[in-house]
Amino acid sequence: MESFKIKKICCIGAGYVGGPTMAVIAEKCPHLKVTVVDINEERIDEWNSSDLENMPIFEPGLKEIISKVRGKNLFFSTQIAKEIKESDMVFISVNTPTKTEGFGAGYAIDLKWVESSARQVAKYAQGHTIVVEKSTLPVKTAEVIKEILLNSIKNKNCKDYDKTFSILSNPEFLAEGTAIQNLQNPDRVLIGGEDQESINYLKEIYMNWVKSTKILTTNLWSSELSKLTANAFLAQRISSINSISAICEVTGAEVGEVSKAVGFDSRIGSEFLSAGPGFGGSCFKKDILNLVYLAKFYRLNEIADYWEQVIKLNNWQNRRISQLIVEKLFGTVSLKKIVILGFSFKANTNDTRESPAISIVNDLLENGAEIKIHDPKVKSKQIMKDLNLSFNTKEKRKEFGSWDYVSDVYKALENADAAVIVTEWPEYKKLDWLKISEIMRNPAWLFDTRSITEPSAIKETSINYWSVGNGSLE
Ligand code: NAD
Ligand code: UGA
């Protein structure tokens, strides 16, 4: 390994993590050639599109970085074998969803994509290759990857007699919507591994922009478990404040005031204490389910129950919102026009995975509502996929409601019975509710599941108002 130097990096998986993470590495390390590969040709084409508005991911600040480094030291490609062959370090950043069938279905992670990535690396790598787990993985996954890689060397037909590997865990902590900020100025970088030399190679890359005091090194299993634990703790805080939001609504306490008072305690801190429609996103639920699975596997049933409760509370919070909407609209939403403001799982992203909007809309459709959906960044094609329904569903199923995609909020609200703020997009904070009250059908309702509207602005109108953690305005 004496002459070994990191010159080329390959990242398998051009998704929400692979794309932005490699863009920032390329920006901060102009001496490295970084290539992101994917089996999804359409996605790679979008990353290579000359129209930066057409990139597969919307993330503030990403466009600017891509325009600086793409074609210089950052590349997107489908030539997986070639890129692995030429690389000294390979990141695995592929999807790790919850298994939907077979053993562990509903809890365990489906490692199919990680395994196929490891097999590709085993087959095509040459010389020494450092393999870095970037995906969030169950504890002990590095063992699986190691076995696949080492078996490829043991294979007597293997011509690359100098082929060697080492494996590191380097989980990603970025949050969508603030990914670039998080990558450029991370709270910490975590590297787990057994081989100090390889750890140092990865550490050197990060040290191009991250202080060494923020780079933590641990053993492989602590690193893998820390990632699951961090997500579980964050999600737990949301379920905790959401449970308090329901108590606020029946007691007259205001959840914003409670969050603030609680968060002022330096031991608790103010982040992740906003009540809402329940957490969405591709990771919190699957990572907690994975933790539950791990606990059950080791027969730690009380621990499994403890973490599962975070998800149960989240489902409850999500469900109670659609029930409440129906209840407030005189017990029926059949043929009522309801405008959904926001479909992404949080603001500043076009990602809709596990978005609370999906189940709220589905519940309302089942109750016969006529839904209009607005989102500044989510395309109608994506919504159609998520709802698994085409437009004007009513025509196909008699009792079922219908839905439509709208680009003009004010127009959509004409004659509407209710507006529901599901995502906290900044533009929804600026809506003119006095003007809106004149165009909605009375009695009109605003359901604010993010508590972003100023109650005093609604008080001046004829609109009835309910917000999470505050209840209805008297
Ligand atoms: P994603 O679905 O957006 O992207 C994964 C990509 O991997 C897809 O484009 C898919 O086509 C590709 N892929 C799968 N198998 C492949 C193979 N064998 N060869 C080449 N490409 C392959 O997923 P994501 O949101 O980027 O998440 C990736 C991982 O990072 C997950 O483990 C997730 O838990 C973790 N993570 C996600 C976030 C987030 O905010 N999304 C944050 C931190 C960690
Ligand atoms: C989360 C973590 O914050 C990241 O650190 C982690 O890397 C990532 O998961 C992952 O592993 O995928 P992300 O899901 O992108 O990031 O976004 P968050 O900001 O955590 O929001 C998740 C959900 O919780 C959203 O639906 C959001 O609206 C909700 N939320 C967040 C609240 O309801 N209240 C809050 O106070 C904060």
Image (spheres, rainbow, N blue to C red):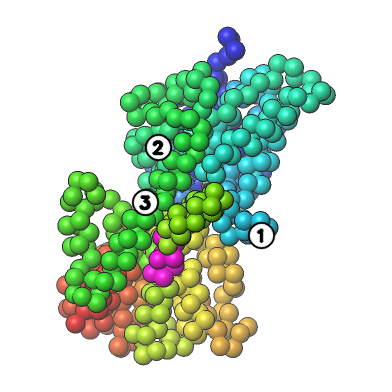
The type of residue carrying mark 3 is: Leu
- Note whether 468 is above or below 30 in the view shown: below
Question: Any magenta on residue 316?
Answer: yes
Amino acid carrying mark 1 in the image: Glu
Horizontal arrangement in the rendering, residue 266 relative to residue 363 (left or right): left
Does any portion of residue 433 appear in the rendered image? no
Instruction: Give the residue type that dot 2 points to.
Output: Leu
Mark 2 secondary-structure assignment: helix
Circle 1 sits in a helix, a strand or a loop, which is it?
Answer: loop
Picture quadrant of residue 450: bottom left
Quick one: label 3 or label 1, which is nearer the N terminus? 1
For the record, the magenta segment spans: 310-318
What quarter of the picture does the C terminus occupy? bottom left
Residue visible at 31% across and 77% down? 446
Disc 3 Cβ-to-ligand 2 distance below 8 Å: yes
Q: Do the numbered discs 3 and 1 sit on residues whose CB atoms are within 8 Å? A: no
Q: Which residue is mark 3?
A: 234
> Looking at the rendering, which quadrant does residue 24 occupy?
top left
Residue at label 2? Answer: 183
Question: Tag 1: Cα neighbours inside 10 Å, few (<14), some, or many (≥20)?
Answer: few
Q: Which residue does the numbered mark 1 point to in the structure image?
A: 101
**Residue at image coords 64%, 31%:** 146
- Marks 1 and 2, the one that precedes in the sequence: 1
Q: Is residue 88 magenta?
A: no
Q: Estimate the x, y position of residue 405 in percent, counting from the top left.
A: 49, 70
User: Where residue 180 appears, x then y in whole percent?
Assistant: 39, 40
